[in-house]
Amino acid sequence: MSTDIAVPPQKQRPVGRFWASTIGKKTVMAVTGLALVAYLFAHMLGNLKIFLGAADINGYAAWLRTIGEPALPYGVFLWIARVGLIVAVVLHIVAAAQLSLRDRRARPVRYVHGRVSFATSTMRWGGATLAVYVVWHILDLTVGVANRDYVDGQPYHNIVADFSVWWVNVIYIVALLMLGLHLNHGFASAARTLGVATGTIRTVGTVVAVVITGGFLVVPIAVMTGLVA
């Protein structure tokens, strides 16, 4: 059942009309997607501090909680950022789901011919997989529910303890490869929606996808191989 609200266009507010339109939903997907890419890049850089040692990455994690002081209480900025990310993810998913429903209604019979890239064909269920992965990641390394050796305020210890378990590595590696495919296709789609799609932009999207995916992958690989212990 569609989540669109059947309200006459003339009675909708500008924001409502924008959200109800296909281009509006695509724009929301593009903007939230690019915001999430920016977050992922910053998060990846922070994770790479693990190669500088426990003091560096633990100190970085502690510093994140002091951003905004004294105007904001300790740790509040981090929670504001988390809420913003959650809103972006929800908007991204809802817009994608509603666009998918519209696409199916407009074309109930799938194309029989035509080549579709693997990234494109897996965009929808790949996004759902990543949504589940995000929940796992939060439970695992943010609140520590899924990490039996979790120690609050000690990200170096938590990461090493986590990626010392083979099946945890499998979960992360598979999810990160899916992330790379999603980023590669999503970046190009966002560029088309925003009217800046060029060959250069597509190349930039591929580079961004490879860099972010590779940057996240080197951490579990380093723990598995004993480079970080």
Image: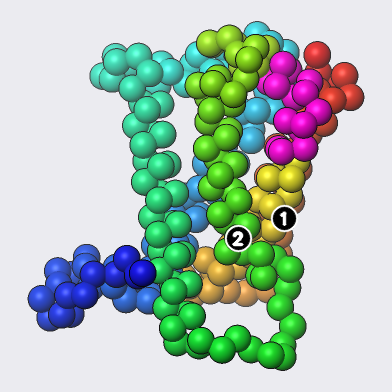
Hey, what amino acid is under mark 1? Val
Location of the C terminus by quadrant is: top right
| Label 2 Cα neighbours within 10 Å, binned few <14 / some 14-19 / many ≥20 | few
Estimate the x, y position of residue 89 in percent, counting from the top left.
Answer: 44, 49
The residue tagged 1 is 207
44 horizontally vs 11: left or right: right
Residue visible at 69% across and 58% down? 181
Label 1 vs 2, first from the N-terminus: 2
Instruction: Name above or below for residue 171 compared with residue 55.
Output: below
Estimate the x, y position of residue 95 in percent, counting from the top left.
Answer: 41, 63
Disc number placed over residue 125 in the picture, else none? 2
Disc number placed over residue 182 in the picture, else none? none
Residue 167 is one of the magenta-drawn residues: yes
Location of the N terminus by quadrant is: bottom left
Pick whichever, 111 or 30, lies toward us: 111
82 horizontally vs 170: left or right: left
Distance from label 1 to label 2 (Cα)? 23 Å
Residue visible at 56% across and 54% down? 128
Pick whichever, 42 or 157, lies toward us: 157
Secondary structure state at the residue bearing disc 2: helix
Secondary structure state at the residue bearing disc 1: helix
Q: Looking at the magenta stretch, what is its main secondary structure?
A: helix
* Range covered by the magenta-colored residues: 159-172
Residue visible at 71% across and 78% down? 116
Instruction: Name above or below for residue 171 compared with residue 35.
Output: above
Residue visible at 44% across and 83% down? 105
Instruction: Name above or below for residue 215 compared with residue 94.
Output: above
Hey, what amino acid is under mark 2? Trp
